[in-house]
Image (cartoon, coloured by chain):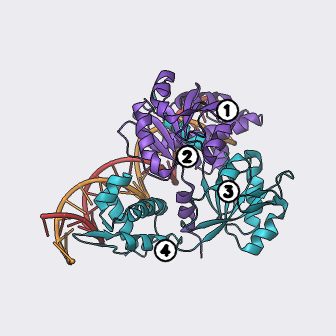
Chain colours: A cyan, B purple, C orange, D red
DNA sequence: CATTGTGAACGGGTTCACAGCA
DNA sequence: TGCTGTGAACCCGTTCACAATG
């Protein structure tokens, strides 16, 4: 096991491994190999072995990896063996859909507060949540100790709301707004932008 | 200008450049520099210059780049100076939100057909679209010549639906289902999976 | 004088290939 | 024999630094 810092690109592949292992586990499979995983997620077997070896020796020569053991290790490494509360900001169509999505549970996440600045929406119920006034984000997020947020506000509002979230103590933001956020060092941001990804693909299509 | 194949990683940055340039353009800005772009999207200036230089000499020493000209070039490179029709499959909460999203127009895309396999949803209207039976996908997509699809079906259905889409002639899929798709070479797939991205960030958080 | 375009240097991620072990 | 773990080789993307130029 290496004690050197883990390359971010390695970290970025771990959730995929975990996802695939969980699926195999649900299907009743008990062991796997780097080859088996490779065929399922399209990452080379050598790459997979090298990635795991960054964290320890998880496998057995000749037999491969124990799926439950590997899941446990990956969940611990990614810190999703505990539950992170999430603040969801922006309750338009997309925010609605996310608030109602059941897929976060058992993956280490739980939406715990939803915010919007539209008086017509504040106080309404979405699933189990009451939409709260985004003017109250700082005290509420601070009191709850929330560190992770999902941002589904219009592009024009995203930078400002993100700054407020950071002031409230959030350090990780999943940004659905089509803008690059400019935030202090140490704040993690990930982007979800379908247009960016569609345009990436059209480069390769013949018109 | 290089005539060698463009690295995919370069292509993946072009949509971000375009997005940022469009924003500057809307704000009335007429020229920019690699330095200016760098500060806005957090990619090094040298990187930006090198990326552009793969396609030609777009700038002028001393003055930088013309924003309208650069937009035009990037739109042509990404082939989004024309409109790609999109098939949207899976009309749950997320599919609904996407169908109603106005942001695709003027970015090279237009949702042209929406499908679901739930009899309760087939025939209902979502925005301007009538939900069609996914059993009819192949003839409809073929007739319309659709090449791009967005997949918002449950994980368990995604692989099968994706295969059907490929049989119908689709060659680019934006997959929102939390599974890796296994498709023939030549088919482009991009993934949108919030849990993967959240778990990437939690690695860096302190618990 | 500011800024581009680019060859060269650098750094680091991926693949290779094989020793080691169940 | 089958498969892991890993050093070394390889490859490729990024940064550097500067000549070129409007």
The chain letter under disc 1 is: B
Disc number lying in front (2 or 1) = 1
Residue at the spot 58% in from the left edge and 65% down from the top edge: A105
Q: Which residue, as the protein is rendered here, is positioned at the far front?
A: B119
Task: Estimate the spatial distance between the alpha carbons at disc 4 and disc 3, rounded to whole Å.
Answer: 26 Å
Q: Which residue position is annotated with label 4?
A: A76
Residue count near mark 1 (Cα–Cα under 10 Å), binned few <14, some 14–19, many ≥20: many
x and y, in percent, of residue A43 in the image: 36, 54
**Tag 1, which secondary structure?**
helix
**Tag 2, which secondary structure?**
helix
Contact check, label 3 and label 1, Cβ < 8 Å: no
Q: Which residue, as the protein is rendered here, is positioned at the far right?
A: A119
Task: Estimate the spatial distance between the alpha carbons at disc 2 and disc 4, rounded to whole Å.
Answer: 38 Å
Disc number lying in front (2 or 4) = 4
Q: Which residue position is annotated with label 3?
A: A99
Q: In the image shown, does B154 or A158 lie closer to the viewer?
A: B154
Q: Which residue position is annotated with label 1?
A: B67
Disc number lying in front (3 or 1) = 3
Q: Is residue B106 visible?
A: no
x and y, in percent, of residue C22 in the image: 21, 77
Q: Quadrant of the C terminus of chain B?
A: bottom right
Task: Estimate the spatial distance between the alpha carbons at disc 4 and disc 1, rounded to whole Å.
Answer: 47 Å
The chain letter under disc 4 is: A
x and y, in percent, of residue A91 in the image: 74, 52
**Res B46 label:** 2
Task: Estimate the spatial distance between the alpha carbons at disc 2 and disc 1, rounded to whole Å.
Answer: 18 Å
Contact check, label 4 and label 3, Cβ < 8 Å: no
The chain letter under disc 2 is: B
Q: Is residue A102 visible?
A: yes
């Amino acid at each position: 096991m290496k004690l050197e810092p883990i390359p971010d690109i390695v970290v970025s592949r771990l959730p995929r491994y975990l996802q695939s292992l969980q699926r195999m586990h649900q299907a009743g499979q008990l062991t796997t190999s780097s080859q088996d995983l490779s065929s399922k997620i399209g990452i080379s077997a050598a790459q997979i072995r090298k990635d795991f070896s960054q964290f320890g020796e998880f496998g057995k020569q000749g037999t491969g990896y124990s799926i439950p053991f590997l899941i446990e290790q990956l969940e611990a490494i990614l810190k999703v063996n505990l539950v992170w509360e999430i603040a969801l900001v922006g309750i338009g169509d997309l925010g609605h859909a996310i608030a109602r999505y059941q897929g976060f549970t058992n993956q280490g996440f739980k939406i715990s507060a939803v915010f919007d600045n539209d008086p017509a929406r504040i106080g309404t119920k979405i699933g189990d949540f009451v939409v709260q006034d985004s003017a109250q984000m700082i005290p509420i997020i601070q009191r709850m100790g929330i560190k992770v947020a999902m941002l589904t506000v219009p592009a024009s509002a995203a930078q400002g709301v993100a700054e407020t979230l950071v002031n409230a103590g959030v350090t990780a933001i999943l940004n659905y707004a089509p803008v690059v956020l400019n935030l202090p060092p140490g704040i993690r941001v990930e982007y979800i932008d379908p247009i960016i990804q569609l345009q990436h693909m059209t480069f390769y299509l013949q018109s």
